[in-house]
Image (cartoon, rainbow, N blue to C red):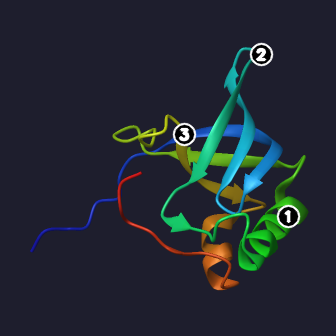
Amino acid sequence: MNPVVAAPVTVYPARIERVIDGDTVVARLSLGLGVELLQHVQLAGINAPERPTAAGKQARAYVEERLLHRQVTLSVNPQRPRDSFGRVLAVVDMDGSNFNQELLDEGLAVAYSGNR
């Protein structure tokens, strides 16, 4: 029987600067030694409705209310750090809670395992 091994992650402190939609934000990542980098971040493992829809507007508003201008931690899988659009793929941790999972629990996103 093989043990289940969690993928290693790289963790970055970040501040959410802008919300694009329910599953995409712009974050200021702290790389250490005073170096910061502004990046588009796709929330890994989820897909929220698109912006023009009522559900998309609701998801975006929720993310803005919970994350905008807040300090978070981004966990990035170094094996696949970016999606096909060049966005950083990350799990957002806010106050010790997995925000990606929160969006699923609130019904504002669905699980997504495809390739973007």
In the drawing, what numbered circle is on residue 20? none
Q: Residue at x 65, y 55 (%)?
A: 92
The residue type indicated by label 2 comes to Gly
Q: Residue furthest left?
A: 1
**Sooner in the amino-acid sequence: mark 3 or mark 1:** 1
Vertical relation: 5 (above or below) 10: below
Label 3 sits on a secondary structure element that is: strand
Q: Position of residue 115 (x, y in %)?
A: 35, 54
Depth order, front residue of 75/88:
88
Asked if one can make out residue 98 in the rendered structure from this viewpoint, the answer is no
Label 1 sits on a secondary structure element that is: helix
In the drawing, what numbered circle is on residue 88? 3
Vertical relation: 104 (above or below) 46: below
How packed mark 1 is, by other alpha carbons closer than 10 Å (few <14, some 14-19, many 20 or more), is few
Residue receiving disc 2: 34
- What separation in Å lies between label 3 and label 1 (alpha carbons)? 20 Å
The residue type indicated by label 3 comes to Val
Number of marks in the rendered image: 3
Q: Residue at x 80, y 75 (%)?
A: 58
Vertical relation: 92 (above or below) 56: above
The residue type indicated by label 1 comes to Arg
Asked if one can make out residue 45 in the rendered structure from this viewpoint, the answer is yes
Q: Residue furthest front?
A: 52
Q: Position of residue 109 (x, y in %)?
A: 61, 75
In the drawing, what numbered circle is on residue 66? 1
How packed mark 3 is, by other alpha carbons closer than 10 Å (few <14, some 14-19, many 20 or more), is many
- What separation in Å lies between label 2 and label 1 (alpha carbons)? 26 Å
